[in-house]
Image (cartoon, rainbow, N blue to C red):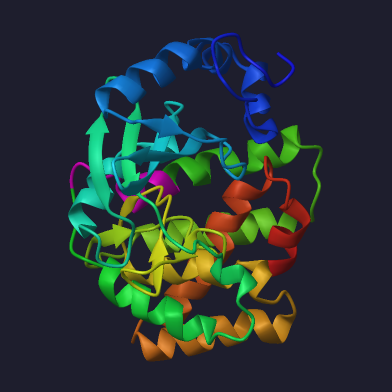
Amino acid sequence: MSGSSPGLPFQIPEKLLWLEQHRAGRTWLSRLPALFDSARTRFALESVGQPFTGGYVSLVLPAKRGPDDLVLKLQFAHRECRHEADALQLWNGSGACLLLDHDPDLGALLLERCRPGHYLADAPHTDRMSVLAELLRKLLVPAGAPFTALNDEAAGWISSLERDWRNAGKPCEKHLVDAAVAALTELRADKTPSVLLHQDLHGHNILSATRDPWLAIDPKPLAGDPAFALGPIVRSFEFGHTRDATLYRLDRLSEELELNRERARRWTIGQPMAWAFDSTHSDRHFRTC
């Protein structure tokens, strides 16, 4: 595919084209025209605009129904996206965008549109850590099933880290892999409260809105240790990637939210290393760790 698809009135965003490398991805891309038409009918959408370009596993488009500005999201069946609708339903608009409708057979979500929709990453004159602290106070609600348990996800990271490092051509020093395995192993051994976690709460997954000043999107949910919630923020290099800036996020948020700083620090080693080897930002993840 070149980025276009017969039956779609728009180009498929370039960031989705990596799916052509996998049979399931190629199948989903080939089904997109039918999924798009079915979702448009299912949600009675009057118009759909050009896709947003940021997603790697979803086709996301602005839509209209009557006077309402909406967002249509068609999801590739990716493990990390599982239960996104459940997470948005549980939050019910508190700290996150509202889920207005959902068709699991189509992998389609109908969401409120955040206006003006600016990224928190692009708001340097805003106290961004204050925004994040306020969001986490709303998002860290008790949760269990059906969400994937953080400890189960961490077990998968532990089992794959060294293999992924070798398959990637050993792009970092081995001691970082060892440190991540040790951190995750220690963290899994402890029992903690279980809360709903936004696994990817970085500066481009938080949008300015009118209903609330800022709302989270694209949660990739897990359920587990509250201290994990700081990891995605600490590794968010768009908030500053110096040692001082990284530690400032860890120190400030762990203090303001009364979360265990040492556990948050270890999660910030474990998850970024687990995600690094197929990331376009791998060097930055290594540096964070």
Quarter of the image containing the C terminus?
bottom right
Residue 104 can be seen in this image:
no
Q: Quadrant of residue 5?
A: top right
Total marks shown come to: 0
On screen, residue 223 versus residue 166, left or right, reads left
How far across and how far down the image is residue 276, in percent? 66, 49
Quarter of the image containing the N terminus?
top right
x 63%, y 71%: residue:
122
On screen, residue 63 versus residue 143, left or right, reads right
- As drawn, 108 above or below 245: above
How far across and how far down the image is residue 74, in percent? 42, 30
On screen, residue 62 versus residue 281, left or right, reads left
- As drawn, 93 above or below 133: above
Instruction: State yes or no: residue 150 in magenta.
Output: yes
Q: Quadrant of residue 162?
A: top right
Residue 239 can be seen in this image:
yes
Which residue occupies the foreground of this view, 47 or 135? 47
- As drawn, 250 above or below 223: below
The magenta stretch spans which residues?
145-154
Q: Quadrant of residue 217?
A: bottom left
Which residue occupies the foreground of this view, 135 or 114? 114
x 57%, y 20%: residue:
9
How far across and how far down the image is residue 95, in percent? 31, 67
How far across and how far down the image is residue 37, in percent? 39, 17
Instruction: State yes or no: residue 21 in magenta.
Output: no
x 49%, y 89%: residue:
252
x 35%, y 51%: residue:
151
